[in-house]
Image: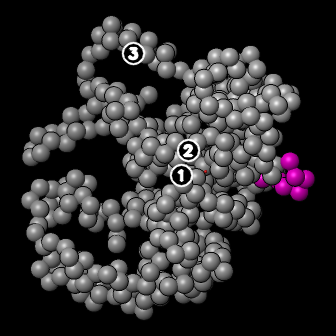
Amino acid sequence: PALLFVKTGTGNEGGRRFYACSACRDRKECNFFQWEDEKVSQTRLAAREEYNRKHQPSFTHRQNVERYKNFVQLPLSKRRFCQECQQLLLPAEWEKHSDHQFLCGISTAQLKSPSQLLYPLENKKTTAQYLFADRSCQFLLNLLIDLGFRRVLCVGTPRLHELIQSKASQEDFRVRSLLLDIDFRYSQFYTEDEFCHYNMFNHYFFDGEAAHETCRKFLYEDNGERVIMITDPPFGGLVEALASSFKKLMAMWKETGKEDHNNKEMPMFWIFPYFFESRILDFFPSFNMMDYQVDYDNHSLYKHGKTGRRQSPVRIFTNVTPSMIVLPVEEGYRFCTICQRYVSSDNQHCEICNSCTSKDGRQWKHCVLCKKCVKPSWFHCSSCNCCALQTHSCEKTDAGCFVCGKAGHKRSTCPSLSRT
Ligand code: SAH
Ligand code: ZN
Ligand code: ZN
Ligand code: ZN
Ligand code: ZN
């Protein structure tokens, strides 16, 4: 299934609707395109089906689960992983991969950390796989344990899922998790109860009703085991599409709970950059943005500030009460008693705004003319009548903004995209 988009024309021309791939934001990766009202010929349909058949993964999830069982029976010396095909190999298959690079002696520990074994699919316009740094992953897990959650629906968070799964054998560890992700390579390491092949841009379960049911069962809270959903989607993705899928997952949770869940929302952490704050709040007004900076392993820009590198712009958006989200004091967070939440140590409480206003962790300053706090590098520009970088150009653009349609600014500075 694709996603329905609209091409907005310039001027008064009405938009024309078309279907395109939701998972790829690059026509080079997937060129599927179809006008909404287009009649598709039998030949084209057949060609499409043929193409789809040819592009199926070489094994089904079921087959991969069986293969895994066989793989773990092998002595260490016979456990190979093909780096080119990103696949665990059984001895009978070695021949076929003989001119591929492979790893030998795959240990149980390696099988338990697939996110280390597989290379990250970094393509920003498709999977945009950026893995949590250990510190952030541990922080998230400890936080949700402290909050009393016992089940974690991991939507696009394979590394958190992996951390939970790897501890599941410990006796006193009661947290369980289910991974929903589009990266099918993970089906080699997890059973159908631990991983569902899922597209979070259109809420599509590739394994159909069976996978739906797995998810539904997981969300059902037996003996008071509380569920939380944690998601870390590609930042280039459409917030609207993601929000619509997340609402469907929330609805699934609600349906499992009967009266119990009336007027309640499934607890959720949506991990996303701070400049999407107003977009996320548009769809989830009950959410708050936390100051915690989420760090990544394979993203040079998104690493922790205290080590001298740039600070990560990635935050946690959540419907859990802010005062319950305890941030580590040793990493530079403090509790603001007025705001009733943990904030970055440089985030000063502004008396006029009556809140800790910084979004990026630096100390912001209040502008009396704008009646709000702004970035420390901004100055009030009297011709634009707002604060901006001193180097900004005052020219107004004629064409309407791509995001909100209003004149006077471009998409990059659209106020509906960012309160900052
Ligand atoms: N920080 C997380 C990974 C986030 S990267 C962690 O360390 O666990 C984004 C994740 O979303 C990747 O795992 C990627 O495979 C997944 N993803 C990307 N596009 C997706 C889609 N359309 N549907 C479901 N998952 C997707
Ligand atoms: Zn191979
Ligand atoms: Zn405050
Ligand atoms: Zn202020
Ligand atoms: Zn100003």
- For badge 3, the amino acid type reads Arg
At label 1, which amino acid type do we have?
Answer: Tyr
Tell me which amino acid carries mark 2: Pro
Residue 271: x %, y % from top left? 53, 58
Tell me which corner region of the image, top left, top right, bottom left or bottom right, holds residue 193.
Answer: top right
Between 319 and 420, the one lying in front of the other is: 420
Picture quadrant where residue 77 is located: top right
Which is nearer the N-term, disc 3 or disc 1? 3
- The residues colored magenta run 169-175
Query: Residue at coordinates 49% horizontally, 67% vertically from top-left?
Result: 312
Which callout, 2 or 3, points at the residue further toward the start of the chain?
Answer: 3
Magenta: main secondary structure? loop
- Residue behind mark 3: 48
Q: Is mark 1 within 8 Å of ligand 1?
A: yes
Rendered residue at 51%/37% (across/down) = 199
- Please give the name of the residue rendered at 58% of the width and 42% of the height, measured from the top-left corner: 119
Q: Which mark is residue 158?
A: none
- Circle 1 crowding by C-alpha within 10 Å: few under 14, some 14–19, many from 20: many
Mark 1 / mark 2, whichever is N-terminal:
2
Count of labels shown?
3
The kind of secondary structure element at disc 1 is loop
Q: CA distance from mark 2 to mark 3?
A: 29 Å
Residue bearing the label numbered 1: 130
Residue 418 falls in image quadrant? bottom left
Q: Is residue 359 left or right of residue 174?
A: left
Q: Which residue is mark 2?
A: 120
Q: Secondary structure at mark 2?
A: loop
108 in magenta: no
Residue at the image point whose x is 66% and y is 65% from the top: 135
Contact flag, marks 1 and 2 (Cβ < 8 Å)? yes
